[in-house]
Amino acid sequence: MKEHSENYIEKIVREELNRFMERDSSICRCDNCLQDIITLTLNNLPPMYVASDVGHIMTMFHLTRDQLRAQVMVELVKAIDQVKKNPRH
Ligand SMILES: [Zn+2]
């Protein structure tokens, strides 16, 4: 069975965002902000992360799931920062 990468990556983004929110109470919890953070993060990830299947990405770039998650976290930090500075709510 083949995992759909977009859902897989988005799942990681949501999981990591939840962890960030537990630690940082200054992140706005409204739907607009949360959706913006997720969308920004997905948009800023290298296109290959969302374009092809995750198994293929990991094989091609010798990535582990942890490295993939680390890359998500890097972009998530930037997206959170951006939304904090310029919230749409
Ligand atoms: Zn908000």
Image: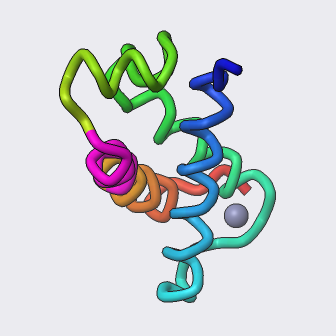
Q: Position of residue 31 (x, y in %)?
A: 80, 57
- Identify the residue at horizontal 75%, vertical 51% (top origin): 32
Residue 71: name its quadrant.
Answer: top left
Say above or below: 44 vs 78. above
Region rendered in magenta:
64-73
Say above or below: 30 vs 6. below
Q: Position of residue 7 (x, y in %)?
A: 68, 32
Q: Left or right: where does residue 44 sit relative to residue 12?
A: left
Closer-to-camera residue (30/76): 76
Residue 57 is covered by the magenta coloring: no
Closer-to-camera residue (69/80): 69
Q: Position of residue 33 (x, y in %)?
A: 67, 56
Q: Of all residues shown, which one is farthest toward the right?
A: 31
- Identify the residue at horizontal 65%, vertical 25% (top origin): 3
- Identify the residue at horizontal 39%, vertical 61% (top origin): 81
Prevailing SS of the magenta stretch: helix
Q: Of all residues shown, which one is farthest toward the front?
A: 1
